Image (cartoon, helix red, strand yellow):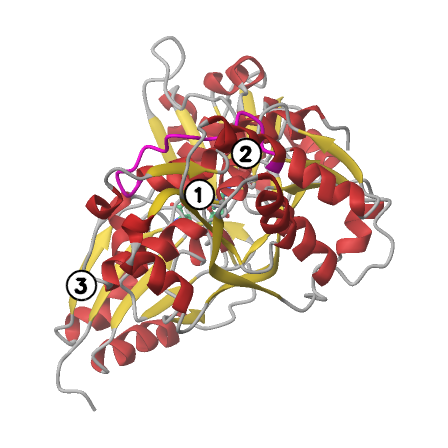
Amino acid sequence: MNNKKGRVTLIGAGPGDKGLITVKGLEYLKQADVVVYDRLVSRDILLLSPESAELINVGKVMNHHNIPQPEINKILLNKAMEGKNVVRLKGGDPFVFGRGGEELELVTENNIEFEVIPGITSAVSALAYAGIPVTHRDFASSIHFVTGHAKDGLVENIDFNALKDTKGTILFYMGVSTLNQLINGLLEAGMDKNTPCAAVENGTRFNMRTLISTLDNMIKDAEKFQLKSPAVIAVGKVCALGDKFAWFSKSKLFSKKVIVPHALNSNNILSEKLKNYGAEVIDFACMQLKEIEDNKNMVDLVKNIHDYKMIIFASKNSVPYFFKELIRAGKDSRALNGIIIAAFGKTCMQELKKYGINADVSPFEYSIESLALSINKLNINGKKALIYAENDEILRDTLKEKCSDIKEVSAYKIEYLPFDYILPLKEYINQGVVTAFTSSAAVNGFVQAADMEDFRNVKAVCIGQMTYDTAKKYNMQAYMSERADIESLIEKIKEMEQ
Ligand code: SAH
C-alpha cells in the first residue's frame, strides 16, 4: 500500500444544469483520481470528471439504498488510504440533507485531509429556474428548509404549528411520497388554505416541470400532474409569482429534442449552448479526430513556413494541430508574421484568436465557392497552404480547382465510430426530431455511423451552404441557417417544428 495518504473533497454538484457547479468545485473535480457520486448528480456534471478517474456510483433510490451509508464511508476512507485524490460528488449542496457530515466521520477519525466545497442547493435553484424568488420584501422574509423524508411511514418531527406562523417560504426536500402528510399537516395547523404552493420537478434540467397551486388544491393537483421525485415542494406567497416570472420553460428550445452528431474528442459548443437553453440534446458521437503520425507535410510546412504567402485553415480543428507542430519545432505564433491567414468559418476564426491570430480573410458565407472567391480577390502570387482534414476531399478538390498554387497539408484524419445501439436514433428521427449539423464532416460522420439506409426523414438543420449541400446529397430534408455560425444555427433550430 502507498504510504502517502490521499485526500477527500466533498463537492456540491448543484441541481443538474452543468453550469451550476462552482468554479472551485469544477477545478477540484478535474483533479480527481476517484469520483464517488450519487443518483442526483447529473450526467453532464459527471462527464466533467477526468477520463482517467475511477467513477463509483453509490446512488441511492428512495427506500432502496443501493449501498448502505457505512459502506460509502468506507469506500471514501479506503480510496484515500490508497493515496488517491477522492472526490465525493453530491447533488446540490453536500451539507443540505446530503449526509455530508456523516461521510466525514470516518475520514476525520483516520486523519485524512479533507475539504468541503459547497454547492447550489436544489430547492433555491429549482425555484429560481421556475421564476419563483424564494424571498421577496412584500411576501416572505424567511426561508425554511425542511425534509419531508418519512421514517416508518411518518414524516419526521415537523413542527407544523411553528411553520405555519413563520409567514416565510417553506421548502420541502424529499417530500413527493409524503406530500399528503406535509400539506395536511400545514392545513391542520391552521395555515390559510389559499396559501400559494408550488412543486418543481427536475429543476434546472431539460425535463423540468412546474406545478403552481394552493394549499387546499395541492394534493389533488399534484396527483393529476403525476408529480415525481426529485422535486422540491414550496409553500408560501412567493409561489404565486411563478406564473409571471417563469423564464427557463419559456425558451423556445426548452425541452426540445435535438440530435447533435459530433466528433468525440472535440469541443461540442453547439450541445453546450443548446443545453443552456434547456434543450434535450441527444449527443451522437459519430466520429473521432485522430492525429496523423509522422505528418511529413505538416513538418515541412512548419519548417519552411516563409515559403508560403498564405495559410488557409479549413476547420477549427485544423488550428490546434498546426500550432502543436509549430511549438514542437520550437516556434510560436510570431512565425506567422507577414503571412496572410484565412479562416473557413466563424468558429475557425475564434479558434485562431486563442493563439493570438486575427484572420485576414474569412468568407462571408460558409461555402467553398465563397472561400475561393475571397482568396482569389487578394490576387496573391505565391504558394498557399491549405490545412484541412485528410478525408475532406470535396473541399480540397474544389479549392485546388478554383485557386492557384495550393499545397494541401492534412492536419488530422477523421475516423467514423460504430453506431451506438443504446441510442434510439431511428425512433427519434421518425418522431421528427431535428438533427443539427455543424459541418459537412458531421453529415458524413452521421451517414457513416447511423446504421440507416434511407435519410429522407432526417430533418437536417445545417450551418452553411457546404453542410447544406452535403445533407442534400443524402436526400435529407435540409434547412440552412442564415449565417454560418452557431448562434444563427440555434436561431434556425428554434424555428423548427417538432
Ligand atoms: N443535497 C441536496 C439535497 C439532497 S436530498 C441539495 O442540496 O439539493 C434530495 C432531494 O433534493 C430530492 O428529494 C428533492 O427534493 C431535491 N432535489 C434534488 N435535485 C433536485 C432537482 N433537480 N429538482 C428539484 N428537486 C431536487
Sort mark 3 into few (<14), some (14-19) or many (20+) by Cα contacts within 10 Å: some
Q: Are marks 3 and 1 in contact (CB under 8 Å)?
A: no
In this picture, residue 428 sits left or right of residue 92: right
Q: Are marks 2 and 3 in contact (CB under 8 Å)?
A: no
Q: Nearer the viewer, mark 2 or mark 3?
A: 2
- Tell whether position 5 is magenta: no
Q: CA gap, disc 1 to disc 2?
A: 9 Å
Q: Main secondary structure of the magenta part?
A: loop
Residue 9 pos. (x, y %): 24, 61
38 is higher (above) or lower (below) than 238:
below
Is residue 457 or residue 101 the one in the foreground?
457
Residue behind label 2 places its C-beta within 8 angstroms of ligand 1:
no
Q: CA gap, disc 3 to disc 1?
A: 50 Å
Residue 358 in view of the camera: yes
Q: Which residue is mark 3?
A: 114
Q: Tag 3 or tag 2, which sits nearer the N-term?
A: 3
Image: magenta residue range: 354-368
Is residue 259 or residue 483 the one in the foreground?
483
Instruction: Give the residue type at disc 2.
Output: Leu
Q: Which residue is mark 1?
A: 312
Q: Tag 1 or tag 3, which sits nearer the N-term?
A: 3
Using the image, tell me which numbered label, if any, was put on residue 339: none
For this orientation, the residue located farthest to the front is: 381
Sort mark 2 into few (<14), some (14-19) or many (20+) by Cα contacts within 10 Å: many
Q: Secondary structure under badge 1? A: strand
Q: Secondary structure under badge 2? A: helix
Q: Which residue is mark 2?
A: 371
Q: Quadrant of residue 158?
A: top left
Number of numbered discs overlaid on the protein picture? 3
Q: Tag 2 or tag 1, which sits nearer the N-term?
A: 1
Instruction: Give the residue type at disc 3.
Output: Phe
Residue 256 in view of the camera: no
